Amino acid sequence: MKFRMRSGLLAAMMVAALALSAGCGDNDNGGGNDNDGGGNGASPTPVRTATPGATATPGSGGQANVSFTVSASAAVQAFKVEVGYPTAKGSFTGNADTTGCTTDDAGIFLPNDNDSGKLILVASEAVGALGFPVVINCTFDQAGGQTLAAGDLTPVVVEVSDTDANPLPVNTISVNRAVS
């Protein structure tokens, strides 16, 4: 079977699938601190940086089930949604290509969470339209003393493609979220 990939989203999904299968954790490939001044023997000049906000210890406050229900007003072959969440309340189970999200409603599904407060959800069919609604279920590891609420999650539709691999307006799909 031979077909052309004309969609930037579809091509990006295929590249992302390869990248995710290789892992997305420590990407410096060095395994150590590379602050050697370029190897010329010079000491690096220290630079003051902001201290990041508090992050949660996964699993210390129980787990919440999070469901995203994606609906469409037209035939859609692929979409990408980014979901912001407060890291002080926890993070999605797993990370990178092991993020604890599943769906039975898409042929290709790529969840990605690098624990920085942004969950990326990409879904597609290789040929034809996705069957809507697409329901995505995730597990969220709550920090001790924290409770995740649906209002803490801010889904933003980034990209949508039709069945001819043409871009569609982002408001072609909507994302509802629920936490239990």
Image (tube, rainbow, N blue to C red):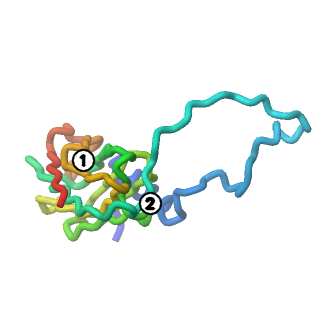
Identify the mark at residue 63; answer none if there is no mark. Answer: none
The answer to whether one can see residue 31 in this image is: yes
Structural crowding at the residue carrying mark 1, measured as other residues with C-alpha within 10 Å and reported as few (<14), some (14–19) or many (≥20): many
x 88%, y 34%: residue: 42
Which sits earlier in the primary sequence, circle 1 or circle 2? 2
The answer to whether one can see residue 5 in this image is: no
Instruction: Name the residue furthest right.
Output: 41
Q: Quadrant of the C terminus?
A: bottom left
Residue 86 rendering spot, x and y as whole percentages:
34, 44
Q: Is residue 11 left or right of residue 133?
A: right
Say which of 149 and 112 sits in front.
149
Residue that badge 1 annotates = 161
Which callout, 1 or 2, points to the residue nearer the camera? 2
Amino acid carrying label 2: it is Asn
Structural crowding at the residue carrying mark 2, measured as other residues with C-alpha within 10 Å and reported as few (<14), some (14–19) or many (≥20): some
Q: Quadrant of the N terminus?
A: bottom left
x 61%, y 30%: residue: 49
Whether residue 151 is situated above or below residue 96 in the rendered picture: above
Identify the mark at residue 95; answer none if there is no mark. Answer: 2
Amino acid carrying label 1: it is Ser
Question: Which secondary structure lies at badge 1?
Answer: strand
Instruction: Name the residue furthest front.
Output: 145
Residue 169 rendering spot, x and y as whole percentages:
19, 37
Residue 70 rendering spot, x and y as whole percentages:
16, 53
